[in-house]
């Protein structure tokens, strides 16, 4: 395939998914907005004043980056996991792409771009929803955008790998429920790890979601538990590793070809 | 009468030359050599399948369920990993130049495999996109194809709203959108009504007249007789016969005809034409075998001489089916 043809194929995969995401917006965008409004009401209006400040900022402002990231993580992951799983398991329409000359890296990029699109859009919506509650405060827009895109990318790749391996619908629900959600909640969405005992601070550093939330929070508030370069490095390394795995699995036809 | 083994040995691919004699010397559209497939569970689906197709050919790949037809197609289209062997599509090796090889192939699978929530036109146009064809080029092409396949008025419908026959036609339109030189159809008319089947036959005839090479698997042997120039019969993972339809049928060396008598005297008639290996069908009907040394006229004359009137003589249809049954039930390999 020429680069132009590869671009057309990539665009086709992405366009198809984005059309789907927008068409079913009550399922793709609305839940994240409704959930975050509830969080903002509870942590802003009900509990916020009693909790006070965290690292020198109001509690609600402290948790906004974490809540945005929580929505980004779950939406980017679930989007790609569902699309890959359903296209190989239900309609078997993944064959439409597999019989074509589209190279494996384009297939990976196309599926992942759909997840990144949803992750970024959901993140922006949740952020916009937070403004009436927490006000507008951005320390570094480039860092915010970098973490928004890289997090969506990493989780979309994870979702793609999950979708490839899943053998049943349970297979794409287990990881988000029993792995991602605990990692998000224990990744510093609602607190700074400096309040944890030393041992648990160390354990938290084994949680990749911690670096995602911490770096994103730095972009908003200019405060972090770990240097921003470390968080960025962890995220980039995660993206690179997951990209390689996803590319290898699509190329080898793992669980997609006989 | 030729035994299954004789037919198989006479027709089996033997390195290219013999095949070219029967199929002409056109550019090879498909060259399959010693294709083997062993599935993870240990099932050996293909045991060294070899065949060629010149450009413009129409080959019907026949075989009972589980013979290996769909595995062959899966390997050609890249959906099944082969264990060993080689495949070249218009000279492009499917391993070394898989992108180029795939451009030449359009596939209509046995099972429906499109997103039922997508619109008909989107399914076809998106497929073009996967081949690197821009929407501006694909849209008018898709409109034309849907028109030809009588789906144009359904182009904006969600595909789940189509009837079974329409869904099959949609898969044909999708397979043709990138203008492949080799169209592969896996049981394209399975479960469709007679009228639709005839319509599809006409469409496939038009395609092949326009130069498209077609490889089709089918259970309907009448379909193979009607459409195909060549037939390959696969059984238990091995090609047991291949050649022109005429060539394979001629190897029967005999043909069964049905004789309808004026009166119900089939038993008496059978005694008169015992040399023709008669089989009683009804009290007034019997089947007789005419081999290369005899004629129908001899049998009719003998009956008339014995005072048994003959009302009608007709050729028994389904001769290809007869060859097929002999080969596959005999387990020739």
Image (tube, helix red, strand yellow):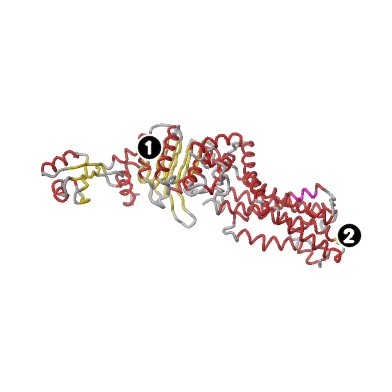
- In this view, the residue farthest toward the left is B306
For disc 2, the marked residue is A56
Question: Where is residue A161 shown, x and y percent of the image?
Answer: 63, 54
Residue A48's place in the image compared with B246, above or below, is below
**What segment is highlighted magenta in the picture?**
A143-148
Question: Where is residue A217 shown, x and y percent of the image?
Answer: 81, 55
Label ID, residue B255 = none
User: Which of the two residues, B328 or B269, is positioned nearer the viewer here?
Assistant: B269
Is B228 on the left-hand or right-hand side of B253? right
Is A104 on the left-hand or right-hand side of A238? left
User: Which of the two residues, A151 or A11, is positioned nearer the viewer here?
Assistant: A11
Q: Which chain carries label 2?
A: A
Residue A81's place in the image compared with B93, above or below, is below
Question: Where is residue A201 shown, x and y percent of the image?
Answer: 79, 64
For disc 1, the marked residue is B229
Dominant secondary structure, magenta: helix
Membership of A145 in magenta stretch: yes
């Amino acid at each position: 395939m020429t680069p132009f043809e590869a671009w057309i194929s990539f665009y086709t995969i992405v366009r198809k998914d984005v059309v789907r995401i927008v068409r079913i917006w009550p399922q793709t965008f609305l839940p994240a907005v409704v959930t975050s409004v509830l969080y903002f009401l509870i942590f802003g209006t009900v509990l916020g004043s009693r909790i006070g400040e965290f690292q020198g900022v109001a509690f609600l402002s402290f948790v906004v980056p974490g809540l945005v990231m929580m929505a980004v993580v779950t939406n980017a992951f679930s989007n790609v996991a569902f699309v890959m799983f359903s296209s190989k398991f239900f309609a078997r329409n993944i064959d439409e792409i597999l019989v074509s000359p589209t190279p494996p890296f384009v297939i990976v990029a196309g599926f992942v771009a759909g997840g990144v699109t949803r992750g970024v859009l959901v993140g922006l919506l949740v952020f916009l929803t937070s403004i009436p509650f927490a006000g507008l405060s951005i320390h570094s827009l480039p860092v915010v955008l970098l973490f928004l895109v890289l997090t969506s990318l990493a989780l979309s790749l994870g979702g793609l790998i999950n979708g490839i391996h899943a053998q049943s619908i349970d297979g794409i629900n287990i990881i988000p429920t029993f792995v991602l959600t605990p990692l998000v909640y224990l990744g510093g969405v609602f607190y700074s790890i400096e309040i944890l005992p030393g041992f648990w601070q160390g354990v938290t550093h084994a949680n990749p979601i911690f670096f995602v939330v911490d770096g994103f929070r730095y972009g908003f508030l200019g405060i972090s538990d770990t240097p921003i370069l470390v968080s960025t490095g962890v995220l980039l390394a995660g993206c690179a590793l997951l990209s390689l795995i996803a590319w290898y699995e699509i190329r080898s036809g793992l669980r997609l070809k006989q | 009468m030729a035994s299954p083994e004789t037919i198989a040995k006479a027709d089996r691919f033997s390195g290219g030359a013999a095949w070219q004699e029967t199929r002409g010397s056109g550019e090879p559209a498909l060259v399959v050599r010693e294709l083997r497939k062993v599935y993870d569970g240990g099932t050996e689906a293909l045991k060294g399948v070899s065949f060629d197709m010149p450009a413009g050919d129409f080959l019907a790949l026949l075989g009972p369920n589980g013979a290996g037809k769909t595995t062959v197609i899966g390997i050609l289209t890249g959906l099944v990993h082969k264990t060993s062997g080689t495949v070249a599509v218009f000279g492009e090796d499917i391993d070394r130049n898989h992108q180029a090889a795939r451009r030449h192939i359009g596939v209509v699978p046995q099972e429906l495999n499109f997103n039922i929530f997508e619109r008909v036109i989107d399914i076809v146009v998106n497929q073009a996109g996967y081949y690197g064809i821009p929407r501006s080029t694909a849209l008018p092409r898709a409109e034309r194809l849907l028109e030809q396949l009588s789906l144009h008025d359904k182009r904006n419908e969600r595909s789940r709203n189509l009837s079974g026959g329409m869904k099959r036609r949609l898969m044909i339109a999708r397979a043709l959108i990138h203008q492949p030189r080799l169209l592969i159809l896996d049981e394209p008319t399975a479960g469709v009504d007679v009228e639709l089947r005839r319509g599809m036959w006409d469409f496939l005839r038009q395609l092949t007249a326009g130069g498209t090479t077609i490889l089709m698997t089918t259970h309907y042997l009448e379909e193979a007789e009607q459409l195909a120039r060549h037939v390959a019969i696969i059984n238990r993972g091995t090609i047991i016969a291949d050649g022109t339809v005429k060539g394979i049928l001629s190897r029967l060396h005999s043909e069964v005809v049905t004789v309808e008598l004026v009166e119900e005297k089939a038993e008496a008639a059978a005694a008169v034409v015992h040399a023709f290996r008669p089989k009683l069908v009804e009290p007034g009907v019997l089947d007789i075998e005419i081999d290369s040394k005899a004629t129908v006229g001899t049998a009719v004359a003998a009956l008339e001489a014995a005072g048994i009137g003959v009302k009608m003589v007709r050729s028994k249809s389904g001769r290809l089916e007869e060859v097929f049954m002999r080969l596959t039930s005999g387990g020739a390999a």
